[in-house]
Image (cartoon, helix red, strand yellow):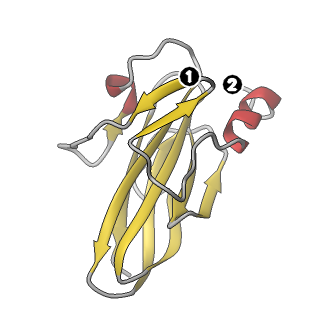
Amino acid sequence: VDMSDEKERNIFDQDTIDVAHFQPKTTICDKEYQWSVLEAEHSTIDLKELVKEDGEYKVAYLWTQIDMPQDRVGALGIGSDDGVKVWLNGDLVHANWVLREVVEDNDRIPVCFKKGKNQLVLKIQSTGGPWGFCCRLLND
């Protein structure tokens, strides 16, 4: 895959959901989607097993809410296959347009969680082949 492919880069750069406000359903390119619950047995999530969509290039948005007992400065360790964007409480905190396999903590992103509920959204873009991610809060 040519990482300079303009069409794929445009897909990565465009964000088709409201990352600041969770809605149970969202519309992308005139098609309505409903969020699904994901429970993982392993640290790496294989999105190809979960998303049964045709097509070589795919995008998945993942949303979670993290309730913190106090303010916390730390780092997220993220591995992705392929490109990844990360929003914390509606703010873009990381973007990496890359072609790679999932490796735990490939990207280490400094973050500031606030006391209470925090919204974390990931966008994982596949450029073909395997497709997945892992994400965890690292202890500094």
Amino acid type shown at disc 2:
Val
Vertical placement of residue 78 versus 55, above or below: below
**Dot 2: what SS?**
loop
Residue occupying the far bottom of the picture: 70
Image coords of residue 1 (percent x, y) = 69, 25
**Counting other residues with Cα less than 10 Å from the Cα at mark 1, is it few (<14), some (14-19), or many (20 or more)?**
some
Instruction: Tell me: residue 30, above or below residue 82.
Output: above
Q: Are marks 1 and 2 in contact (CB under 8 Å)?
A: yes
- For marks 1 and 2, the one nearer the N-term is 2
Q: Quadrant of the C terminus?
A: bottom left
Q: Position of residue 13 (x, y in %)?
A: 72, 44
Which residue is located at x 38 percent, y 87 percent? 71
Residue named by callout 1: 128
Which residue matches tag 2? Answer: 1
* Along the viewing direction, whichever of 14 and 98 lies nearer the viewer: 14
Could you tell whether 95 is left or right of 121 in the image? Answer: right
Amino acid identity at mark 1 = Gly
